[in-house]
Amino acid sequence: MSGMVKEDLPSTNLPSTMQAWVVREERHGDPLDAMKLETVPVPRPGVGEVIIKVKAAGINYNHLWACWGRPLPVSSLHDDPVHIGGSDVSGIVAAVGEGVDLWQVGDEVITHPNQSCGQCAACNGYEPLSCRQQKAWGFETSGGSFAEYAKVQAQQLIHKPDNLNWAEASCYGLKLFTAYRMLMVNCDIQPNDRVLIWGASGGLGSYAIQLCKMISAIPICVISSPAKEQYCRSLGAELFIDRNEYPRLYPNEQDSGAPNKDMRRFRRKVRELTGGYDPDIVFEHVGAVTFPTSVFVARRQGKIVICGATTGYQLSFDARYLWMHQKQIIGSHGCNLHNAQRANFLVESGAIKPTLTQVYDFNDAALAHDHLAHSTDFTGSLAITVD
């Protein structure tokens, strides 16, 4: 926290064991069954690595995939039979490995989730996210933030904003940095752009709203309850579509793949809200049940940017609306350090607010993930306090 005295954590004083929330392949299922608190060895830093004493950990949807074993079991993600998830962390540097010069024990940090080899051409001059060894820390690796200590690459570290407490600092990294790259980098969003945001009241959507408002773009928020609409309004949004009024936003065999009645009604609603305009950008992360509509409603030469698929990753759409209207589908994955630092500056300056809505105790980490998986009133972001 701001003004606190840094803790004395020399690397030689690391304990031998720690408590961690572990997922194992043999107990894949809902979080309350898959996640168990276990005693495991404390990691040691290798070359270019850092050990963080975890103060708080942000919760993301990717750990639900790890719990469920979908689309791959955790044994397929990495070689470690113990999977400790968690892709967001705030904490204190507890130990540094050989070759780490920019960070020292006692530094207060957060992280971005992209790991890469650091040696190839992609990492050195092109784009680390194109590295063939690129992995999402805490999902495609073990040793994530749901533990008392976490091991990361030094290039993942970012200074924790002084104006935030530990929970606030832990809740936004993956979500904000991903949304920033989607909109600011891959879509080059401009003032007055109309941006359709699926799941607008959730973690990704709540940052997409703020990024739009920050540059005078126009968020069009898809929500599913009055409470979620009110939450989005608190972030500055003004245009809303109730998802419940459009039960089937994907074609079936009877439609012969063409846009169905609900999809066309949905587009009419968008145009009604915008004065006749289609979205310049569609912010996608829902996947199978929304993607056909996303391609359909985007304006001619518009963009559909997608970073995930919580309802399924096998996507279908009417390709005529893609090529004949010259639209673009843009895949976007995580961020690099440069993206993360620029997005984090927006938090430090107060332009973007962390959307933390609920904090859980470390012992309730599985319960927090159960809330994320099954709650119908979920808004914003969740975090767990660890230390």
Image (cartoon, rainbow, N blue to C red):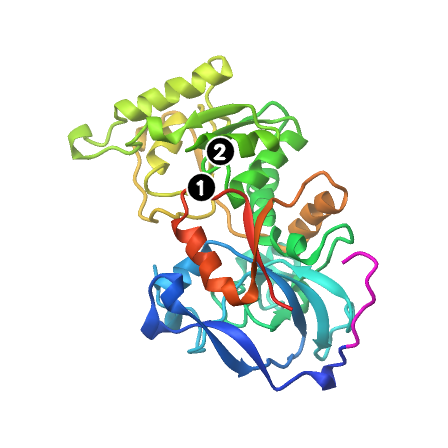
Give the side of residue 78 with respect to residue 218, left or right. left
User: x, y percentage for residue 78?
Assistant: 44, 72
Q: Nearer the viewer, residue 70 or 130?
A: 70
Quick check: marks 2 and 1 in contact, CB under 8 Å? yes
Give the side of residue 18 with respect to residue 261, left or right. right
N-term-proximal mark, 2 vs 1:
2
User: x, y percentage for residue 169?
Assistant: 67, 54
The residue identified by callout 1 is 377
- Residue at (60, 80) in percent of width and height: 43
**Is any part of residue 197 visible from this angle?**
yes
* SS majority, magenta: loop
Is residue 214 placed above or below 74 in the rendered structure?
above
Give the side of residue 315 with respect to residue 328, left or right. left
Q: Residues within 10 Å of mark 1 (few under 14, many from 20)?
A: some
CA separation in Å, label 2 and label 1: 8 Å
* Segment colored magenta: 1-8
Residue 227 - label = 2
Q: Nearer the viewer, residue 159 or 21?
A: 21
Is residue 385 placed above or below 308 in the rendered structure?
below
Q: How many marks?
A: 2
Magenta stretch encompasses residue 4: yes
